Amino acid sequence: MIFPKPVIGLALAGGGAKGIAHIGVIEILEEEGISIDRIAGTSIGAIIGAMYALNPDIYLLKQKIKEIATTGAYQKLALGKFKARKGETWFDKWVNRFQEGALFTELLTKNALLSNEETDEIFHHIFGEKTFDDTKISFASTALDLLTGKDVIMKEGNLWEAAKASTAIPAIFPPVRQKDKLLVDGGVTANIPVKLAFDLGANIVIAVMLKNNPSPPGKLNTALEIYMRSKELAQIKLCKILSKKADLVIKPDVEEVHWADFDKIDFCIKKGKEATKKHLKQIKAVISRDYLAYKKLFGKHKSL
């Protein structure tokens, strides 16, 4: 029996600035001559995935990411206000702002802390009017529909709008209205889009997981702290379940990077490269015809 050539898919997880590590992962794969045939992305994974799918050149991708961080559109987002001060957990940051009353008032009177004007500008800057039809690598992203509770797969239309929906962190970024849907960050329910990568036609999927362990718990003295801690733990558990369907999971060591800390571009890329180099032997094993034959014959992953 002759088995087909492996079709390699990447499932790029969400995680804010941690997701810059995806670039490091792709860079090593590119250096090793490993072609990527399908890309599925959630949140920051949707942004990086779409950018690379449009122009599969790692050098240009790194240049573009660094250029974006210096634009007026990015500066207007002022993401630094969401970062915790040194020695302070991000839970403390939110609690302090609640106590001051400013954040509480904003959350009661607006659907998000950032405006459509601010977010539209940055996504237009990144993608212009490019569509899914312009991608050179088959690509799709995920979002969550608040009205139906269903995951929504985006694989047609404008890339900027799909990226905006997939990265719409509830309460921070505004939800995206799309016909009869109200879309937010796909990371809420499908932070590692392994199934989507398979649905795109991949028969081997490498997933990149950005958060494997809980952050420091903080004081856990307030209702908000307890709620946010519970939400974080639930998402980590869900990610581990979703990642089990991948043939291989790469976990860059970016736990210390805050989701809004886009000043650590070089650090995150370095961590992505390091994690991928550690897995090169396994990567080359899972993209082999022998591994694919084992999967086809036995219907499960082969132990590596």
Image (cartoon, rainbow, N blue to C red):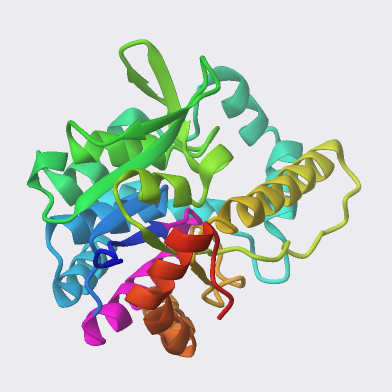
* Residue positioned 24% across, 43% down in the render: 123
Q: In the picture provided, is 208 more to the left or to the right than 199?
A: right
Q: Quarter of the image containing the N terminus?
A: bottom left
Residue 187's x, y, as percent? 52, 44
Residue 203 shows up from this direction: yes
Pick whichever, 71 or 178, lies toward us.
178
Residue 17 shows up from this direction: no
Q: Indicate whether 96 appears above or below 115.
A: below
Pick whichever, 85 or 140, lies toward us.
140
Q: In the picture provided, is 142 more to the left or to the right than 148?
A: left
Which range is magenta? 12-33
Residue 87's x, y, as percent? 72, 71
Pick whichever, 37 or 273, lies toward us.
37
* Residue positioned 52% across, 16% down in the render: 148
Q: Which residue extends farthest front?
A: 1
The secondary structure that most of the magenta stretch takes on is: helix
Residue 79's x, y, as percent? 45, 52
